[in-house]
Amino acid sequence: MVELYPPIEPYEHGMLDTGDGNHVYWEVCGNPDGKPAVVVHGGPGSGCTRGVRQCFDPDRYRVVLFDQRGCGRSTPHASDPATDMSRNTTEHLLADMEQLRELLGIERWLLFGGSWGSTLILAYAQRHPRRVSEIVIRGVTTTQRSEVDWLYRGVGRFFPEEWERFRAGAGEDVRDSDLVAAYARLMEDPDPDVRTRAANDWCRWEDAVISLESNGKPGAYSDRPPDGLLALVRICAHYFSHGAWLPDGVLMREAGRLAGIPGALIHGRHDLGSPLGTAWQLARAWPDAELTVISDSGHTGSDAMRERVLGALDEFARR
């Protein structure tokens, strides 16, 4: 079992007023004079967890965590059907990160995250390369259309029964290629029973995709409070049905903008939801990144993956 750093509590926290009705929860822990780092959580819509604080040496890092719009402790919450989702896009999240960096008086920070978080990290770093000292990504995704299509359709060849159930939840008249958009519509339905059923069907499918991971956490998607589950699925379907509002493939094409930023890419060989090919392509396009493939891990990780993550963060702390 990999030994993480001891649990720590924030020494500072607050709500970032974005100016458009959203308030983003943030907290800072570790050493106030340490190396700045920001945690960019996945989902989108999962919110930050307490455990991720323990990935950082509290004597060396000043760690910033925040809940992206609509989830976690940020308000308004996406579980509320009245929450306006038009103000929750990748562009909004990038602006929130910059506003938070300026609020905290940080010149440059290390970016750490995975899954959807890696998409947001790459978009931020390509937009603001001079504000990024290093990058550590666990589970590389870029939210290309082909990646979304694979996760919600292509990988169904490994789970035909579970995918058929997921497909049925979208409605009989929905084409296979429109499943994510169909779920996005269901999550905006005025009937709470419709929203709850769609969220449960979505998370049951996500759980099926990770079900073969022997070292991962079973039920990682559905094992959350009802409000958190509703927000997760509503935000995920909202982002993925719009391709995260990014030109398709742009993060891979613009990887040259990351030149000079040291990066650690850590990816599970058995990640069925986000196959290794994306991480491999990114490592080839980004000369300052080192890819480590974890042979016993999938999307939800393993001891070996956690050990490599801690090793990368410790290495960058020493620089």
Image (spheres, helix red, strand yellow):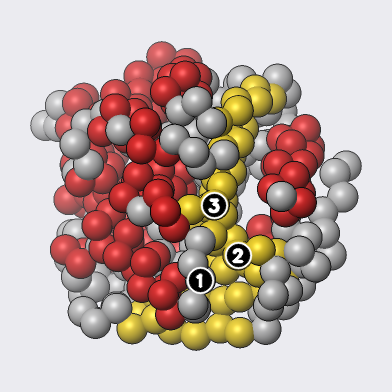
* Structural distance between the alpha carbons of marks 1 and 3: 11 Å
Query: Identity of the amino acid at label 2?
Result: Pro
Mark closer to the chain start, 1 or 3: 1
Q: Secondary structure at mark 3?
A: strand
Query: Identity of the amino acid at label 1?
Result: Ile
Q: Is residue 314 left or right of residue 242?
A: right
> Residue 31: x and y, percent?
73, 74
Q: Nearer the viewer, residue 197 or 96?
A: 96
Query: Identity of the amino acid at label 3?
Result: Ser
Residue tagged 2: 36
Give the label on residue 133, or none: 3
Q: For the N terminus, which image quadrant? A: top right
Determine the image quadrant of residue 203: top left
Q: Nearer the viewer, residue 316 or 158?
A: 316
Q: Residues within 10 Å of mark 2 (few under 14, many from 20)?
A: many
Q: Residue at x 56, y 83 (%)?
A: 13
Q: Secondary structure at mark 1?
A: loop
